[in-house]
Image (spheres, rainbow, N blue to C red):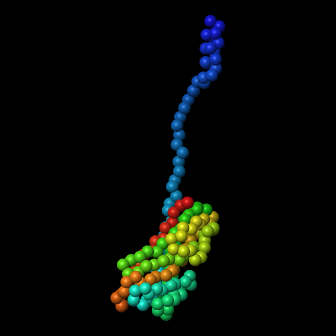
Amino acid sequence: MKKILTATLLTLASTSVLAASETYQATVDALQEPTLTQTSALNFGAIVPTATSACTMDNAGAVTGQCDVSDADILIGEVTLSDLVADTALTVTVSGSSSANLTFASVYDINAAATGGSDGIADATATNITVDNSATDITVDVYGTVTVDSALTSGDTYTVDYTVDVVFQ
Protein backbone atom coordinates (compact mmCIF):
# COMPACT_ATOMS: atom_id res chain seq x y z
CA MET A 1 0.00 0.00 0.00
CA LYS A 2 2.81 2.29 0.89
CA LYS A 3 4.34 1.68 -2.53
CA ILE A 4 1.12 2.55 -4.38
CA LEU A 5 0.69 5.75 -2.39
CA THR A 6 4.30 6.75 -3.08
CA ALA A 7 3.88 6.02 -6.80
CA THR A 8 0.66 8.05 -6.89
CA LEU A 9 2.29 11.00 -5.14
CA LEU A 10 5.26 10.89 -7.52
CA THR A 11 2.96 10.82 -10.53
CA LEU A 12 1.01 13.82 -9.29
CA ALA A 13 4.21 15.72 -8.49
CA SER A 14 5.75 15.08 -11.91
CA THR A 15 2.76 16.16 -13.97
CA SER A 16 1.62 19.72 -13.98
CA VAL A 17 -1.93 20.74 -14.50
CA LEU A 18 -2.50 23.21 -17.33
CA ALA A 19 -4.61 26.10 -16.12
CA ALA A 20 -5.11 27.82 -19.51
CA SER A 21 -3.75 27.99 -23.06
CA GLU A 22 -4.28 30.45 -25.93
CA THR A 23 -2.77 30.77 -29.41
CA TYR A 24 -1.73 34.20 -30.73
CA GLN A 25 -0.33 35.42 -34.06
CA ALA A 26 2.91 37.14 -34.99
CA THR A 27 2.35 39.67 -37.77
CA VAL A 28 4.67 41.04 -40.44
CA ASP A 29 4.15 43.37 -43.36
CA ALA A 30 6.09 42.59 -46.52
CA LEU A 31 8.21 45.50 -47.71
CA GLN A 32 6.99 47.23 -50.83
CA GLU A 33 9.20 46.67 -53.85
CA PRO A 34 11.21 49.67 -54.99
CA THR A 35 9.81 51.65 -57.91
CA LEU A 36 12.01 51.74 -61.03
CA THR A 37 11.64 54.74 -63.34
CA GLN A 38 13.57 55.43 -66.52
CA THR A 39 14.77 58.99 -65.96
CA SER A 40 16.59 59.21 -69.30
CA ALA A 41 16.51 56.79 -72.23
CA LEU A 42 19.84 55.32 -73.32
CA ASN A 43 20.62 56.49 -76.87
CA PHE A 44 23.84 55.78 -78.76
CA GLY A 45 22.86 58.07 -81.65
CA ALA A 46 23.71 57.02 -85.22
CA ILE A 47 25.87 53.97 -85.97
CA VAL A 48 27.41 52.62 -89.18
CA PRO A 49 24.77 50.13 -90.45
CA THR A 50 27.12 47.29 -91.45
CA ALA A 51 27.44 44.04 -89.50
CA THR A 52 30.12 44.06 -86.75
CA SER A 53 29.97 47.85 -86.33
CA ALA A 54 30.25 48.76 -82.65
CA CYS A 55 29.70 51.89 -80.61
CA THR A 56 30.92 52.24 -77.03
CA MET A 57 29.62 54.82 -74.54
CA ASP A 58 31.55 55.76 -71.40
CA ASN A 59 30.15 56.88 -68.04
CA ALA A 60 30.24 60.52 -69.16
CA GLY A 61 28.04 59.75 -72.19
CA ALA A 62 30.83 60.11 -74.76
CA VAL A 63 30.78 57.59 -77.62
CA THR A 64 33.62 56.07 -79.62
CA GLY A 65 33.78 53.53 -82.40
CA GLN A 66 31.72 53.30 -85.56
CA CYS A 67 29.18 55.88 -84.52
CA ASP A 68 28.50 59.58 -85.06
CA VAL A 69 30.15 61.22 -82.03
CA SER A 70 28.42 64.54 -82.78
CA ASP A 71 24.86 63.10 -82.86
CA ALA A 72 22.60 65.31 -80.73
CA ASP A 73 20.54 62.29 -79.59
CA ILE A 74 23.37 60.66 -77.61
CA LEU A 75 22.29 60.22 -74.00
CA ILE A 76 23.43 58.04 -71.12
CA GLY A 77 20.61 55.95 -69.67
CA GLU A 78 19.45 56.63 -66.14
CA VAL A 79 17.06 54.62 -63.98
CA THR A 80 15.87 55.90 -60.58
CA LEU A 81 15.07 53.54 -57.71
CA SER A 82 12.52 55.19 -55.42
CA ASP A 83 10.01 54.23 -52.70
CA LEU A 84 12.93 52.72 -50.81
CA VAL A 85 13.02 51.64 -47.18
CA ALA A 86 15.89 52.96 -45.04
CA ASP A 87 18.79 50.60 -44.34
CA THR A 88 17.42 47.86 -46.62
CA ALA A 89 19.86 45.53 -48.38
CA LEU A 90 19.22 45.15 -52.12
CA THR A 91 20.91 43.48 -55.06
CA VAL A 92 20.99 45.39 -58.36
CA THR A 93 21.78 43.79 -61.73
CA VAL A 94 21.74 45.41 -65.18
CA SER A 95 21.78 42.99 -68.11
CA GLY A 96 22.03 43.74 -71.80
CA SER A 97 20.54 41.51 -74.47
CA SER A 98 20.34 40.81 -78.18
CA SER A 99 17.63 41.71 -80.65
CA ALA A 100 17.27 40.68 -84.29
CA ASN A 101 20.02 43.10 -85.35
CA LEU A 102 21.84 44.38 -82.26
CA THR A 103 23.61 43.20 -79.13
CA PHE A 104 24.00 45.43 -76.09
CA ALA A 105 26.52 44.73 -73.32
CA SER A 106 25.78 47.05 -70.43
CA VAL A 107 28.12 48.76 -68.01
CA TYR A 108 26.55 50.61 -65.10
CA ASP A 109 27.15 52.84 -62.09
CA ILE A 110 25.14 52.89 -58.86
CA ASN A 111 24.86 56.31 -57.21
CA ALA A 112 23.69 57.40 -53.72
CA ALA A 113 23.69 53.98 -52.03
CA ALA A 114 24.89 53.95 -48.41
CA THR A 115 27.14 50.98 -49.22
CA GLY A 116 27.98 49.04 -52.36
CA GLY A 117 27.60 51.85 -54.89
CA SER A 118 30.21 51.56 -57.59
CA ASP A 119 31.23 52.67 -61.07
CA GLY A 120 31.94 50.55 -64.12
CA ILE A 121 30.02 47.44 -63.11
CA ALA A 122 30.08 44.85 -65.92
CA ASP A 123 27.00 43.49 -67.69
CA ALA A 124 24.89 41.06 -65.64
CA THR A 125 26.99 41.49 -62.48
CA ALA A 126 24.86 41.32 -59.33
CA THR A 127 25.87 44.15 -56.98
CA ASN A 128 24.86 44.26 -53.31
CA ILE A 129 23.95 47.69 -51.95
CA THR A 130 22.34 49.17 -48.86
CA VAL A 131 19.83 52.02 -48.90
CA ASP A 132 20.94 54.92 -46.69
CA ASN A 133 19.12 55.73 -43.44
CA SER A 134 17.12 58.50 -45.13
CA ALA A 135 15.85 56.21 -47.92
CA THR A 136 17.35 58.53 -50.54
CA ASP A 137 16.53 57.65 -54.16
CA ILE A 138 19.29 55.69 -55.88
CA THR A 139 20.19 56.24 -59.53
CA VAL A 140 21.67 53.72 -61.93
CA ASP A 141 23.57 55.13 -64.92
CA VAL A 142 23.59 52.74 -67.89
CA TYR A 143 26.05 52.79 -70.80
CA GLY A 144 28.23 50.19 -72.53
CA THR A 145 28.66 48.81 -76.05
CA VAL A 146 26.12 48.21 -78.79
CA THR A 147 27.15 46.00 -81.73
CA VAL A 148 25.43 45.50 -85.08
CA ASP A 149 24.89 41.75 -85.58
CA SER A 150 23.30 41.93 -89.03
CA ALA A 151 23.19 44.83 -91.48
CA LEU A 152 20.76 47.63 -90.68
CA THR A 153 18.63 49.56 -93.17
CA SER A 154 20.00 53.09 -93.50
CA GLY A 155 17.77 55.71 -91.87
CA ASP A 156 15.73 53.22 -89.78
CA THR A 157 15.69 53.18 -85.97
CA TYR A 158 16.57 50.01 -84.06
CA THR A 159 16.39 49.08 -80.39
CA VAL A 160 17.80 46.45 -78.09
CA ASP A 161 16.58 45.80 -74.55
CA TYR A 162 18.36 45.91 -71.24
CA THR A 163 16.92 44.86 -67.92
CA VAL A 164 17.38 46.40 -64.48
CA ASP A 165 16.64 43.92 -61.69
CA VAL A 166 16.39 44.93 -58.04
CA VAL A 167 15.79 42.23 -55.43
CA PHE A 168 15.81 42.12 -51.64
CA GLN A 169 18.78 40.33 -50.10
Image location of residue 150, percent across then percent down: 37, 83
Image location of residue 144, percent across then percent down: 51, 80
Q: Residue furthest bottom?
A: 70
In this view, 43 is above or below 79? below
Q: Residue at x 56, y 29 (%)?
A: 20
Q: Residue furthest top?
A: 1
The residue closer to the viewer here, 81 or 1, is 1
Q: Is residue 65 visible?
A: yes
Q: Residue at x 65, y 12 (%)?
A: 6
Q: Residue at x 51, y 63 (%)?
A: 167
Q: Residue furthest front?
A: 52
Quarter of the rendering containing residue 133: bottom right
The quarter of the rendered structure image containing the C terminus is bottom right
Q: Residue at x 50, y 77 (%)?
A: 106
The quarter of the rendered structure image containing the N terminus is top right
The residue closer to the viewer here, 52 or 161, is 52
The residue closer to the viewer here, 169 or 25, is 169
In this view, 20 is above or below 164? above
Q: Is residue 78 visible?
A: no
Image location of residue 89, percent across then percent down: 58, 62
The residue closer to the viewer here, 9 or 36, is 9
Quarter of the rendering containing residue 156: bottom left
In this view, 98 is above or below 62? above
How many circles with numbers are drawn on the protein? 0
